[in-house]
Image: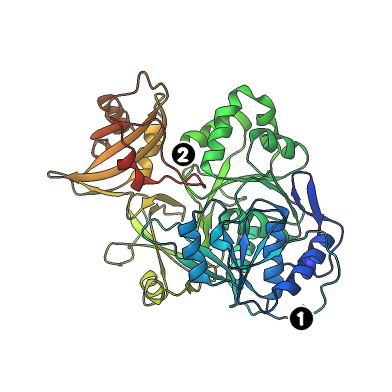
Amino acid sequence: MSILFPALVNPGERPALRFGDRSLTYAELGAAADVLAVRCAGAGRVAVWATPSLETAVAVVAALRVGVAAVPLNPKSGDKELGHILADSAPTVVLAAPGDELPSALGELERVDVEVRAVGGGAGRAVSPGDEDPALVVYTSGTTGPPKGAVIPRRALAATLDALADAWQWTGEDVLVHGLPLFHVHGLVLGILGPLRRGGSVRHLGRFSTEGVTRELNDGATMLFGVPTMYHRIAETLPDDPGLAKALGRARLLVSGSAALPVHDHERITSATGRRVIERYGMTETLMNTSVRADGEPRAGTVGVPLPGVELRLVEEDGTPLPSYDGESVGEIQVRGPNLFTEYLNRPDATAAAFTADGWFRTGDMAVRDPDGYVRIVGRKATDLIKSGGYKIGAGEIENALLEHPGVREAAVTGEADPDLGERIVAWIVPTDPQSPPQLTELADHVAARLAPHKRPRVVHHLPTLPRNDMGKLLKRSLAQDRTE
């Protein structure tokens, strides 16, 4: 059995967590978690009302310390989604910060308030959870049906965080700053549990702001985690904020994830700060699969190389592995390794369908791979792989090309049925100047000059905004509903 948080074995006064003006040392975190663990002992699963707060961090650490699986709940979820998650995961209690108002969907559950200042002791916490025991049940976004609960074992948490430590040279001396939500893998596992496993510290902004990033990086933070929406805001702010540029230049590592960061934003940030943003690639079911390494080439537009312990291959539509990697051939990513989830809770059919007979997980993500191992995601198989005129085309590279046009603020690319081509390429554009948006011919010529003629859009729609979720991921299935021509 591996210990998830060695720094809590004999905790000292080193800072562990800070949310705004509230903070806990490792000794305080250990004491608070142990008191709460007594309340959780014996529970099958516990729900966590996952606000960006000290209470959420203490709640999850307490559950992990006592060997109880935690189910993080998105506070923005509607009653129907919450009802499904609660019925599916069947937690016995819900952990929440004192004073948090919980929705009616949680009304039948016993509530335990999380106190971050320990009162009393944690006696009775004598458990030895195994590496394969469930640590978290994290629900997927449910874009193709009700959300599925991915059961993440303790083994996967340890494997992915240790692999990232190797790739990023992440140590207990690092101080991480981020403003990510805590109900998903990026914000909770990487952003909270990652620093705690290393014995380092994390400063959570509560709500992301460029002012907060500047303040924390100037005050000794060494790493910044964000999603593309956050880095886009940074790129937009940099020209008028030399203080932000200077602060980012001090960071040891700038990491973007949860969706692809447009190359245009990469280049704007590098030009202003001298620092490269590195990207990594993971999923709820797999945690982290690849990353650009801190000691590797920071190649914009790629998600780097497989992490230690992770096997990765690209396969054809029939499941045949690509014979070689040339940086052009598109295949579906399949992965295998200790970072993978155990199952979809109560869904043996979905679990079986997600894996090949020899244990490879079918990600549904399409990519190309360079001969030296670097992986470049081109989109989701269901929404981003366009088959046009006999070519397999990834939407991502066209989106990056469109974003290089000065008249394009945001861009999305999809395919739609075409009697001649099979599918035609459709561009969805948020123009820089809504009064004078770039037209089809101009954009098609722009893309064809950068990529290839068969990758040019055949249709363009102009939108005031693109639909995105809380993590900044584009909701392409919503585009047709939001269309304004």
In this view, which residue lies farthest toward the left? Answer: 420
What's the amino acid at mark 1? Ala
Mark 1, secondary structure of its residue: loop
Note whether residue 167 is visible: no
314 lies above or below 398: below
Mark 2, secondary structure of its residue: loop
Question: Quadrant location of the N terminus?
Answer: bottom right
Whether tag 1 and tag 2 are in contact, CB under 8 A, the answer is: no
Q: Residue 309, position in %: x, y? A: 55, 68
Q: Residue 471, position in %: x, y? A: 52, 47
Residue appearing at x 46%, y 64% in the figure: 84
In this view, which residue lies farthest toward the top? Answer: 435
Camera-side residue of 478 and 429: 478
Camera-side residue of 267 and 230: 230
Which mark is first along the chain, 2 or 1? 1
155 lies above or below 212: below
Note whether residue 101 is visible: yes
What's the amino acid at mark 2? Pro
Question: Quadrant location of the C terminus?
Answer: top left
Q: Which residue is mark 2?
A: 262
Crowding around mark 2 (Cα neighbors within 10 Å: few <14, some 14 to 19, many 20+) is many
Taking the image as shown, residue 157 lies to the left or right of residue 61, namely: left
Residue appearing at x 36%, y 77% in the figure: 357
Camera-side residue of 388 and 369: 388
Question: Which disc, if any, is residue 156?
Answer: none
Question: Which disc, if any, is residue 126?
Answer: 1
Residue appearing at x 78%, y 59% in the figure: 116
Taking the image as shown, residue 59 lies to the left or right of residue 390, namely: right
Q: Residue 23, position in %: x, y? A: 79, 51
Alpha carbon distance from label 1 to label 2: 48 Å
122 lies above or below 278: below
